[in-house]
Image (cartoon, rainbow, N blue to C red):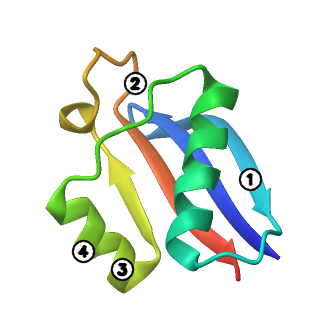
Amino acid sequence: MFRLNGKIVKDGKIIASCVSRQEANVNRTKKVYDALEEICQHFDLPVPIWLPARIKEFQTRSKTSFLADSFLEEIPFDALEIQVIEE
């Protein structure tokens, strides 16, 4: 089972958190995109843009933070952090 943890961080504190579980037998990229979309729906957020720095960080560390520059709309927090917690 693939699990992706999503956290909303403001002023260095976690203000909300949720976990997406993906069981589909699809490639890892599809699982990540589907899980991120589910997390954003849970938090009622637009899906962030994957900037090159975020892609590279996620590929190497299995986690990344989406800051204000990753969203087309203004966000009321500092970052949306995602991290793979099980593959």
Residue 22 lies, in percent from the top left, at 77, 63
Q: Residue 77 carries which label?
A: 2
Name the mark nearer the viewer: 3 or 2: 3
Describe residue 14's horizontal placement relative to residue 78 as left or right. Answer: right
Can you identify the residue that label 1 sits on?
20
**Residue lying farthest front?**
26
Categorize mark 4 by other alpha carbons within 10 Å: few (<14), some (14-19), many (20+): some
- Considering only order in the chain, which callout, 1 or 3, is on the residue closer to the N terminus? 1
Q: In which quarter of the image is the C terminus?
A: bottom right
Residue designated by label 3: 59
Give the x, y percent position of residue 13.
50, 38
Q: Say which of 42 and 30 sits in front.
A: 30
Kind of residue sitting beneath label 1: Ser
Q: At x 47% / y 76%, what residue is drawn?
A: 62
Q: Which residue is drawn at 37% across and 71% down?
A: 58
How far is disc 3 from disc 1 in space, using C-alphas? 18 Å
Disc 3/disc 4 C-alpha distance (Å): 5 Å
Cα–Cα span, label 2 and label 4:
23 Å
| Residue identified by numbered label 4 | 56
Compared with 55, 40 (above or below) is above
Which of these two is toward me, 69 or 15? 69
